[in-house]
Image: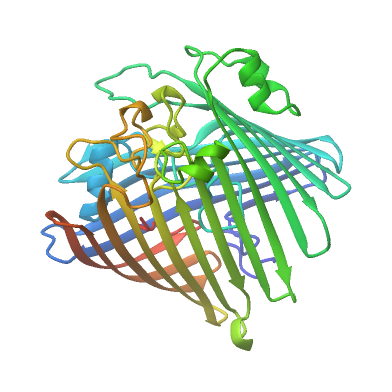
Amino acid sequence: MQSKKPLFRTFYKTKANFIEVNNKDFFLAVNPVLQFTEGFEQGGKKPLFVNSRGVMARGLIAKKLGFSTIITDNQERGPVFFQDQVNKFRAVPGVGFYKPFKTNGYDYFDARGYITFAAVKNYIDVQFGYDKNFIGNGYRSLFLSDWGNSNLFLKLNTKIWKFNYQNLFMELMPQFKKSGDTLLDRKYAAMHHLSMNVTKWLNIGLFEGVIFGRKNRFDFQYLNPIIFYRHIEGTVGSPDNAVAGLDFKANIAHRAQVYGQFLLDEFILSEVKNNPTSWVNKFGIQAGVKYMDAFGVNNLDIQLEMNRVRPFTYSHNDTIANYTHYNQPLAHPLGANFQEVLAIVNFQPAPKWYINLKAIYYYQGLDSAGKNFGSNIFKDYTTRAMNTGFSIGSGAKATCVNAILQCSYEWKENLYFDLSLQYRDYKIANINTGKTNTSLVSAGIRLNMFKRDYDF
C-alpha cells in the first residue's frame, strides 16, 4: 500500500518497506530490524534485556531468482534457566556461537540468508543458503525443528499432481568444547519428505533422514533424491543414524485441523511385543489439533499438542551421528525421554491488538547417579544404565510448568509494543537443588522481528 507522505520522499514510499524498488525485472525491499526489551525476574539482582539491531532484505530478479537475508547484532541477558541452558550446552538457544557480555549476558551475531529459483517452472523449486528449516504442522516437530541454530543447506521442493516431495541436504556441526579460535569439525544430514493430498481434506506424508560423519566430507551416496537412505546406509557399510517417520494433517469443516507425527529411530518387533521397556524401542509420537475462530469467536485460535519421545531416541553409538547441530537438538528442544503437553491461544480482539497465551507442561527422566537414562541425546547410547526397564520418565523425574502471556499493540505496520508475563516452575523429584520457581515481567518494542521466547 502506497504511503501518502513518504519520509524525505525516499523512505517508506509503501507502508510496509523502508526502501522498496519495484521495476519490471527487479524487486527489492529493505527494512530495519529492531528489538529492545527490558524485564525483571523474581529474586533477580540484574535486569533482563534483549537488544537487537539489524537489517533484512528480500528481492526478486527477472521474476526468476529470489533472495532473502536477515542480519542482526544482539545482546541478551535471559532468565536464570536460560543462562543455565547456555552454560550447559555452550550455545545460545536458536543461535549458537556467543561471547560473554557484562554479567551473565551474551553477545551474538545472527546472519541468515538464501537464494531460491524455479528449476522447472511450477514444479521444482531450489533453495540454497544458511538458515533454518521446519518439517511438520505443529508447534514442535519430531522430524526437524527451527528451534536450534541455522545451518548451510540445499533444498529441492517438487510439486506434481497430488504430491509434494522435499529433499534437504545440510552441513552440521557435531558437539564440541571450543576454546579460542578453533576450526570446528563438520557432519552432514540428508532428509526427504513426501506428502500426498489423499483427499481435499487429508494429507499424509513419509519422512526419512540420516545423520552421518565422514571426517569433514559429504558422502555423495546420500545425494540420491529418491532411494531409501536405509538402503544406502547398508550399501556403504556405514553405521549412520537413520530415522523414518509418518505424518498427517486433516482439515475438518474449514474450522479445525488434526495433525500428528510418528518418528521411528529403531524398531525390533520382537522387543516391542515381548519387552516393551527395552532401550531399543526408540520412537516418538506427536498429536495435535488446531481450532480456528473457536466457539464462533472471530480471530480466536486455539492449539493443543502432545509430544511423547522414548528414551535414547535421536542418540547414537557414534556421538558425531547423533541428531544434533551446534550443541543443540535438531528436533524437539528437550531431546528424549519426555512427555510434553502444550496449549496455545491466539486472540486478536481488535485490528491492532494481539494476545497470545502459551501454557506448557512436561515431565522428563534425567540421568541419575551418573547413569545414562536416555534423555541426553548427546551421549553415546552404549553408556546406558541398563538394557531394559525404560519408560518415559525413567531416571530422576523432572517436571515443568511454563506459562507465558503476551499482549502486543501494532502502532505502525510491523512496529509492535509488547508486554509479557511468564511463570515457570521446574523441579526434580527428591532433589531440592534442582528446583527453580520464577516469575518474569518484560516490556519492549520491536520492528520487523519475532519476539524472543523462553518456551522450554
Residue nearer the viewer, 376 or 144: 376
- Residue 249: quarter of image: bottom right
For this orientation, the residue located farthest to the bottom is 296
- What percent of the width, then of the height, locates residue 251? 72, 68
Q: How many marks?
A: 0
In the picture, the quarter occupied by the C terminus is bottom left
For this orientation, the residue located farthest to the right is 161
- What percent of the width, then of the height, locates residue 184? 38, 19
Residue nearer the viewer, 22 or 7: 22
- What percent of the width, then of the height, locates residue 265? 53, 37
Q: Name which residue lies at 61% across and 47% down.
A: 135
- Evaluate whether residue 406 shows in this view: yes
On screen, residue 437 above or below 185: below
On screen, residue 230 above or below 162: above
Q: Name which residue lies at 49% across and 22% down.
A: 187
On screen, residue 112 above or below 432: above
